[in-house]
Image (cartoon, rainbow, N blue to C red):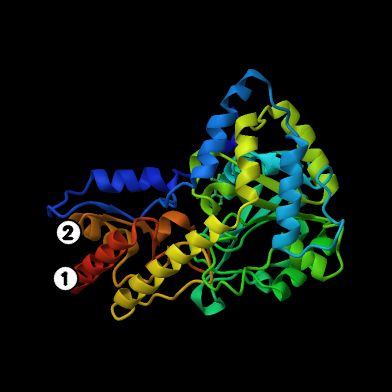
Amino acid sequence: MNSGLEKLHPYPFERLAQLKQETSVVTNAEHIDLSIGEPKHTIPEFILNELQKQLPMVASYPTTRGIDALRQAIAEWLSKRFQLPNGSISADKNILPVNGTREALFAFAQCVINSNSSHSKAPVVISPNPFYQIYEGAALLAGAEPYYINCVEANGFLPDFDAVPENIWQRCQLIYLCSPGNPTGAVIGQESIKKLLELADKHDFIIAADECYSEIYLDEDAPPVGLLQAAANLGRNDYQRCIVFHSLSKRSNVPGMRSGFIAGDAELIQAFLRYRTYHGCAMSLYTQMASIVAWQDEGHVRGNRTLYRQKFDAVLDILKPVMNVTRPDASFYLWPETPVPDAEFATGLYSQQNITVLPGSFLSRSIPAGNPGENRIRVALVAEIDQCVEAAERMCEYIKTI
Ligand SMILES: Cc1ncc(COP(=O)(O)O)c(C=O)c1O
């Protein structure tokens, strides 16, 4: 057995299910689920139509590289969205379709980590804390040691790269960024990326930026900067050491379609293609066809942002007077502070108000600098606006009882 398997932590939703099983609900009020980051807005009909139309393509095996038309559509979307210099992104060399970012974030570490390094150089994978748990599992199963950087309010919920010791940078082979962040919604800026690129050059590691929330931003005039964009702004048009992960799940409300892509450093893409050819995870052809039309349309994405913005406005008006909660730059999450320990808060809220949220400490680890998820909850504003508002009102009622 892979010894990393024993090191894997229970998944946050397993822990949440356990917590709910042990709690009795003492209200007849309707259940409102704000725990899972699963978009609930209407699926654009043109995507469903295309899926249906292309279903007969199940007659053929798809290739790992995907069809040219998909990589071309992605290259065009990526270049336009992040204002990448003309010709710096080639559909052939810099793009690879993936079946959602989850599998790709996991598989990428298996491909790039060299666990045969000598002991003093035993590989380290750096992750934000709190974080999407796949980063940690990917590191452990690749034979690396996870190292966590706390992302706390005092730092705008962003990783402080200066706080990482030199010996960790020396052993680092891969760092995961999550920008916009889950669960904090914080966006890592150009200056911070510049610093990280310098460290990556000095210590020879790869930057894997999970940007699956990049299209769910709150200021229509200020889309979050991406890793490739920040690299290009520094004249690094070869995107060396940089890989970004993008997904249609949140952008286009199709989490079940399992469609995303990775892009960046041509050498890394080539290596990952080789790995995936053996791994055997090609995207079905009908999904590829539906993905093309999804990446080519921005109207439905703007519509999504409008709905999320309305929900943030309404819910923050209700919660701000009773909780320390800030409006994030992006994502569809709130990350408020709780007046009692987070798991106790989530249990009480479920019991008294039949509302499910995720305890912050289920998304974070305790390190000497502290546990940044303690006394916080993650609230996913995925339900309809009326339900989100009702949930916020009921949360206020619950807080009054604490
Ligand atoms: C930070 C983050 N990354 C990646 C994913 C995976 O998304 P998908 O595999 O649907 O692209 C999620 C899903 O919730 C997420 O929150």
| Residue highlighted by disc 1 | 401
Label drawn at residue 352: 2
Q: Residue 243 versus residue 57: which sits nearer the camera?
A: 57
The x and y percentages for residue 18 are: 31, 44
Taking the image as shown, residue 171 lies to the left or right of residue 201, namely left
The amino acid pointed to by label 1 is Thr
Question: Could you tell me which secondary element the residue under label 1 belongs to?
Answer: loop
Location of the N terminus by quadrant is top right
Of the residues shown, which amino acid type is indicated by label 2? Gln
Compare residues 266 and 139 and report the one nearer the observer: 266
Q: Where is residue 52 in the image (x, y as percent from the top left)?
A: 53, 31
Residue 342, quarter of picture: bottom left
Horizontal and vertical percent for residue 185? 52, 66
Q: Residue furthest top?
A: 59
Q: Measured from the top left, where is residue 37 in percent x and y? A: 44, 52
User: On the rendered structure, is 354 left or right of 359?
Assistant: left
Q: What element carries label 2?
A: helix
Q: In this view, does 21 lie above or below 344?
A: above
Residues at badges 2 and 1 in contact (C-beta under 8 Å)?
Answer: yes
